Amino acid sequence: MAMKEDIGDTMISNPRGLPLEAHYKVDPADNVTGYKAFEAGKFGFRRDEYFAYISTPKGTHTMSVDAFLRALMRDVAWGFFYGTVNFDPVFGTTNFYGEVDMFYGALNEAYTSEGRDYVERFRADELMAIFKEMVSDWTNEGFDPFAAPRETGVPWGTKNGDNDDAVSRQRVTARRMVGMPGDTPLRTDASGFPVNTMFDDVAQDQPEVHAEPGFEAEVQAFNLFGYLSRSDVTWNPSVCSVVKDSLFCPTTEEYILPVEHGNDRCEWFIQLSDQITWNIKDGVTGRPKAVVAMKAGDVACMPADIRHQGFSPKRSMLLVWENGSPKVPDLIREGKAPNVSVQF
Ligand code: PHB
Ligand code: FE
C-alpha cells in the first residue's frame, strides 16, 4: 500500500454553533488499480475496474463506477444543487448552502428503521475540493460523465489517463439571458457546438430583433430549440434566463438522470420535445409514490417533499423552472410555504 498523504483537519462552527470537524485524506495511487482513495470525515472512497466502494462506520456501499461518476459529476457541477442529490437509494448529499450533509442510508427507511444510517456534516467548499479531485482522478481518458452512453467511451478498467476538459466544464449560468451582450453566448458550429444527430430536424433560424434606438442592449430573443439542439451534454440544466428569482433552466436529456433529486422546494417541468418518464418517490423514506409519463407539451409541478429520477429513451428537451430564492427551504420547513405550488 502507498503512504497516506494527510491534507489536514479543520474546525468551523455551523449556524447552530456546533463545531464542524472534518478530517480529509487522499491516498496516493493504488499499486494495482492506479486510482487514488479518498477520505472525508468517516467516509472512505475507493474504486477498482468496475465499482466505487463507499465505507462508513455503519457499513460499506457498492455502486457501479459508471453510475457513481455520472452522479458525482452532477453534484460537483451543480455545487450540491437544491436540496438532496441521491446518487442511488442509499448514498448522497444534502445541501445546506455553505454546509453539506453526506449520508449513507439516511433517506432510506430500510436503513433508518434498523439504525443502519450514518450522516456527517461538512463545509461545502472542503467536501467539494475532495469531490473534484475524485472525479478528476477516477475519470479515464475517453469517458465523459456528462455525455449520453452512445456518445462516450467507457469508464471501466485500471487508471488510463484522464478527461479533465470534460469533468471541469463550467455550467452555463446566464446573468440575464443567453445571447445578451456580455452574457453567455449562443452556440454555433464555429464555437464547437454542432447540432446533435438526434436533433437534425430542428430549425436553426433565429428571430429578428428590431429594437428602438437606445434599446439595442436591452432587447434580445433567440431560438431556444436551436440552442438546445446544440447541447453537448445531457442531464445538466443551464440557467438560460433570469427574472429576479425565476430561473429558466432548459436541458437536453437522454438515458437516465444520474441522480434521484430530492427537492427542497417546488420545481416545474415543461416537456419541450419527445418523452421522459419520471419515477417519483417520497423524499424522506424512498417509498415509491408515482410514475409520471411526460410527453411534449406536458407540464408538471414536482412537490417539495419528493425525489424524482427521469428516463429519456430518445434525446429530448426539458425546461426545468427553478425558484432561486434562498428563503424557500426555510419557509417550507417552518410551514409557511406549501409543498405544492397549486392546490386543487
Ligand atoms: C431535476 O432534478 O429536477 C433535474 C436535474 C437534471 C435534469 C433535469 C431535472 O437534467
Ligand atoms: Fe429536481
Image (tube, rainbow, N blue to C red):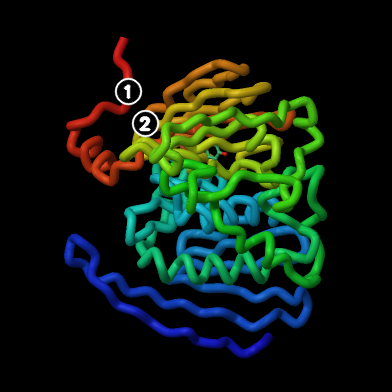
Mark 2 and mark 1: Cα distance apart in space: 7 Å
Q: Is residue 94 above or below residue 230?
A: below
Residue 341 - label: 1
Tell whether 26 sits left or right of 228: left
> Is the residue marked by circle 1 packed among few (<14), some (14-19), or many (20+) residues within 10 Å?
some
CB of mark 2 near ligand 2 (< 8 Å): no
Q: Is residue 71 or residue 187 the one in the foreground? A: 187
CB of mark 1 near ligand 2 (< 8 Å): no
Q: Using the rendered image of the protein, determine whether residue 263 is visible from the camera's viewpoint.
A: no
Disc 2 + disc 1, Cβ < 8 Å? yes
Q: Is residue 313 or residue 299 the one in the foreground? A: 299
| Amino acid carrying mark 2 in the image | Cys
Tell whether 256 sits left or right of 18: right
Instruction: List the single residue furthest toward the top.
Output: 344
Tell whether 94 sits left or right of 269: left
Q: Is residue 251 or residue 37 the one in the foreground? A: 251
Q: Residue at x 59, y 28 (%)?
A: 207
Q: Secondary structure at mark 2?
A: loop
> Is the residue marked by circle 2 packed among few (<14), some (14-19), or many (20+) residues within 10 Å?
many
| Amino acid carrying mark 1 in the image | Ser
Residue 245 - label: none
- Counting every numbered tag in the picture gives 2
Residue 266 - label: 2
Q: Residue at x 61, y 39 (%)?
A: 257
- Quadrant assignment for the C terminus: top left
Q: Position of residue 25 (x, y in %)?
A: 51, 79
Q: Earlier in the sequence, mark 2 or mark 1?
A: 2
